[in-house]
Image: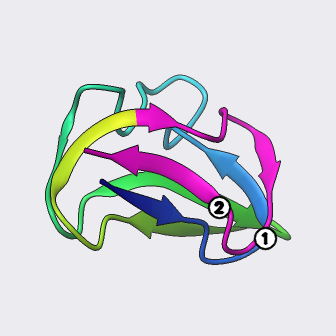
Amino acid sequence: MSQILSPLPGTFYRKPSPDQPNFKNVGDAVAVGDVIGLIEVMKSFNEVTAEEAGTITAFHAEDEEPVMAGQPLVELG
């Protein structure tokens, strides 16, 4: 089991825009390089990508939740 950590502090978004579906959901397969969310810092959006393959077993951050650098965002099984 592994985790995807926030690369920087900011606001975590699970979807590309409010009217779009989530990038990934619990139970989804993830490949290396897949975008799982965005971190917004001062109106700049940074993609959060998977560094290893797996299946998402849990999200530790909700949509639009403030996060800190190094905080676990996603659990991979």
**Picture coordinates of residue 35, whole percent (x, y):** 34, 57
Marking on residue 51: none
Q: Is residue 69 magenta?
A: yes
Q: How is the image coloured?
A: rainbow
Circle 1 Cα neighbour tier, 10 Å, few/some/many (<14 / 14–19 / ≥20): some
Residue visible at 21% across and 68% down in the picture? 52
Residue visible at 72% across and 62% down in the picture? 40
**Picture coordinates of residue 28, whole percent (x, y):** 22, 32
Kindly indicate whether the residue at mark 2 contacts the one at mark 1 (C-beta within 8 angstroms).
Answer: yes
Q: Quadrant of residue 45?
A: bottom right
Give, as a single range, the part of the protein colored magenta: 58-77
Q: Quadrant of residue 43?
A: bottom right
Q: Is residue 73 toward the left or the right of residue 32 in the image?
A: right
Q: Is residue 44 toward the left or the right of residue 22 in the image?
A: right
* Element under disc 1: loop
Residue found at the very far front of the displayed protein:
1
Q: Which residue is mark 2?
A: 39
* Element under disc 2: strand
Q: Is residue 52 magenta?
A: no
Q: Quadrant of residue 50?
A: bottom left
Which mark sits nearer the N-terminus, 1 or 2?
1
Which three-letter amino acid code belongs to the residue tagged 1? Answer: Pro
**Picture coordinates of residue 31, whole percent (x, y):** 14, 58
Residue visible at 31% across and 38% down in the picture? 56
Circle 2 Cα neighbour tier, 10 Å, few/some/many (<14 / 14–19 / ≥20): many
Q: Is residue 61 toward the left or the right of residue 46 in the image?
A: right
- Measure the C-alpha gap from mark 1 to mark 2: 8 Å
Q: Quadrant of the C terminus?
A: top left
From what the image shows, is residue 51 above or below residue 1? below
Marking on residue 9: 1
